Image (cartoon, rainbow, N blue to C red):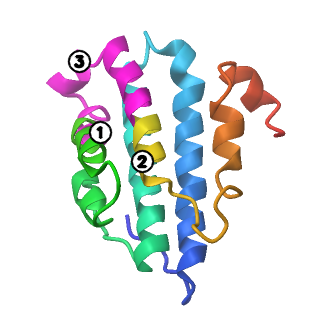
Amino acid sequence: MRHDGCDGDHTVLAEAYLRAAEEDERTARILEPFVEEVPHNICMMVSRACEKYLKAKSMYLNGRTRNVHDLLELVDSLGDIPDRRDAMRAASVLDDYPTQANYPSRTRDRIGVGEATRALELMDRLVSIIDPRDPRVHGEVLMDRFCVCSQRSYINRVQEYKC
């Protein structure tokens, strides 16, 4: 899906992507206690969050982002980032989940607790590599993510979501 544009200020769209990524990540974390029942949904939400984190970073760095869902292409669009190889590895694992985990498929049927747990770990690693925050603000934009995700009591934290 295409974004609506940013009326000349790319940081507005970057922040919108960041908020949407945080929402998808929170959804994945909320589902984590139900990992045995819905591992494919966790993988799908993780991949969606990573796509939006990557697009936010691209907007901050380049003033634009590619209109693709391919995580490898989005990592590539960031240029020469530290730990690029690890970012590409994480993206390559997470890249199939938006479609393969979302719709009936053999991949969806094979996704289990291990894959969902690994997807969450890969998301954490990818976000730590790309640091999708606005470099001018660095530290304020993603406070929601670290308030919610640094705690392991996700359900309680989300219910009282007041960091």
116 part of magenta stretch: yes
Find the distance from the CA under tag 3 to the CA under tag 1.
21 Å
* Amino acid at dot 1: Ala
Residue type at mark 3 is Asp
Residue 97 % position (x, y) = 28, 36
Residue sitting at the far top: 36
Q: In the rendered structure, which disc, 1 or 2, sits on the residue that comes first in sequence?
A: 1
Q: Where is residue 90 in the image (x, y as percent from the top left)?
A: 29, 39
Residue 108: tell me if it is visible. yes
Q: Between marks 1 and 2, how big is the CA–CA gap?
A: 10 Å
Image coordinates of residue 92 in percent, x first then y, are 21, 41
Q: Which residue is drawn at 54% across and 72% down?
A: 13
Q: In the image, which residues are magenta? A: 95-122
Q: Does the magenta stretch include residue 76?
A: no
Q: Which residue is drawn at 29% across and 57% down?
A: 75
Label 1 sits on a secondary structure element that is: helix
Q: Are marks 1 and 2 in contact (CB under 8 Å)?
A: yes
First in residue order: circle 3 vs circle 2: 3
**Tag 3–tag 2 contact (CB < 8 Å):** no
Residue sitting at 44 percent across and 73 percent down? 61
| Quarter location, residue 121 | top left
Query: 44 or 143, which lies in front?
Result: 143
- Position of 104 with respect to 55 (left or right) is left
Q: Which amino acid does label 2 sit on?
A: Ile
- Image check: 87 left or right of 38? left
Look at mark 3 in the image and give the residue it sits on.
Answer: 109
Question: Label 1: which residue?
Answer: 90
The residue singled out by tag 2 in the image is 129
